Image: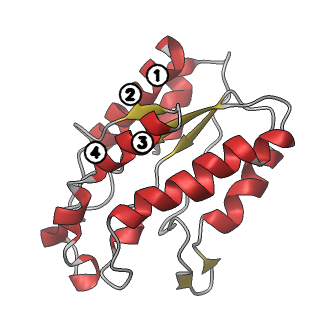
Amino acid sequence: HSYPSVLQKMLGSNYMVIAEGMPSRTTDLDDIKFPKGNRNGSLFFGQCVITHDPLDFVVIMLGSNDMKSKFNRTEETATVVEEKYIKFLQNHLSLELTKNPKIIIVAPPLIDESKIDEMFEGATKKSEKFNDLFKQIATKNNCLFINNDGLECGNDGLHLTPKGLATLAQKVYDVVVNG
């Protein structure tokens, strides 16, 4: 299951939820995973939004994979989401869209590096800043914001449990239905 499929059931047939998640996607870092290719989300974002136009909402939840120790990122991740996703959509993509969708920024869940190999060393401390960093960019750019409170990760310390997926779906539902 994924949170978009749970959200679709919650919203019903008057809505169409489009899932565009991808394992190991980064904000803008080239992370090649053979044989499936580059996981750099910024290379895909523009085409994805234009392909699905018109959209009422665009939900962006990126940053966990940027916490890999080889990338050595923290605050930069939120800055990239602001520049290459929010501002790109608001200032450039919007010129080609039928309507301007509302942007929902979701703070990625806290990472429990004790359950992951050394690839995510230091990620727990970095991910503790997600709520503050992503709320700041959402507020600054007139986006809706969803915090990561209650987004429970499973045995791998990174991916949401079924309960975490349901919690995220409920949070997105609340924002979509209640603004």
Please identify, in this view, whether the residue under mark 4 or under mark 1 is nearer the observer: 4
Dot 3 falls on a residue whose secondary structure is: strand
Question: Residue 133 at what x, y percent from top left?
Answer: 33, 49
Dot 1 falls on a residue whose secondary structure is: helix
Amino acid carrying mark 1 in the image: Val
State the quadrant of the N terminus: top left
Task: Indicate which disc residue 171 carries.
Answer: 2
Amino acid carrying mark 4 in the image: Asp
Q: Which residue is mark 4?
A: 132
- Which one is earlier in the sequence, the residue at label 3 or at label 4? 3
The residues tagged by marks 2 and 3 sit, at their Cα atoms, a distance apart of 9 Å
Q: Which residue is mark 3?
A: 106
* Circle 4 crowding by C-alpha within 10 Å: few under 14, some 14–19, many from 20: few
Task: Indicate which disc residue 19 carries.
Answer: none
Disc 2 and disc 3 in contact, CB within 8 angstroms:
yes
Disc 1 and disc 3 in contact, CB within 8 angstroms:
no
Disc 4 and disc 1 in contact, CB within 8 angstroms:
no
* Circle 2 crowding by C-alpha within 10 Å: few under 14, some 14–19, many from 20: many
The answer to whether 17 is drawn above or below residue 60 in the figure is: above
Of 117 and 161, the residue lying toward us: 117
Amino acid carrying mark 3 in the image: Val
